[in-house]
Image (cartoon, grey):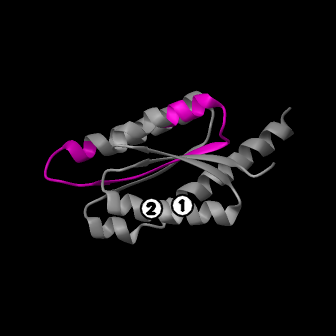
Amino acid sequence: MNAPRIGVVHSRFNEEICNALLETARAELKKAGAEAEFVAVAGALEIPLALQWMAQSGRFDALAAIGAVIRGDTYHFEVVSNESARGIMEVSLESGLPVANGILTVDTEEQALARKAKGAEAVRVAIEMAGLRYELSQKWR
């Protein structure tokens, strides 16, 4: 398999945290020698649709979602956390393309910043799954 082509969709909401996640993701992609394209969206709920468009393009071997949802005083946290995760899984299962979920769901900004390496972890998972998909396609053809 050549260098994997990874599409990354990231949220602009909670900008400081998302920029930290992106920094670790970019470093990991460079280290792995992967090709990558990045798409920014408003928030976590917009990520699945952008992932779907990327999956439909046929340009990518795997995708990664990066964002942060921080608990507030309302039920909105649960809605955003659950529905973004559900949407990401749907994109993966419907398209057959690996999609790594790197959306943090935390109680505080401090917890989120302490987990900034999750950006790198998400692209590592995407690269690993792209390799597995390729390996199995060769084995089973």
Q: How crowded is mark 1: few (under 14 residues within 10 Å), some or many (20 or more)?
A: many
Kindly identify which residue carries mark 1.
25
Quarter the C terminus occupies: top right
Q: Up-down: is 55 above or below 98?
A: above
Give the magenta range: 51-78
How far is the residue under mark 2 from the one under mark 1? 6 Å
Hey, which residue is sitting farthest left in the picture? 73
| Mark 1 residue element | helix
| Between 135 and 33, the one nearer to me in the picture | 33
Give the total number of marks visible in the rendering: 2
The answer to whether residue 94 is above or below residue 122 is above
Q: Residue at x 63, y 32 (%)?
A: 96
Q: What residue type is labelled 2?
A: Leu
Q: Is residue 71 magenta?
A: yes
Residue 55, horizontal then vertical, whole percent: 58, 33
Q: What element carries label 2?
A: helix
Query: What is the number of the mark on residue 21?
Result: 2
Place residue 60 in its image quadrant: top right
Left or right, residue 15 beside residue 52: left
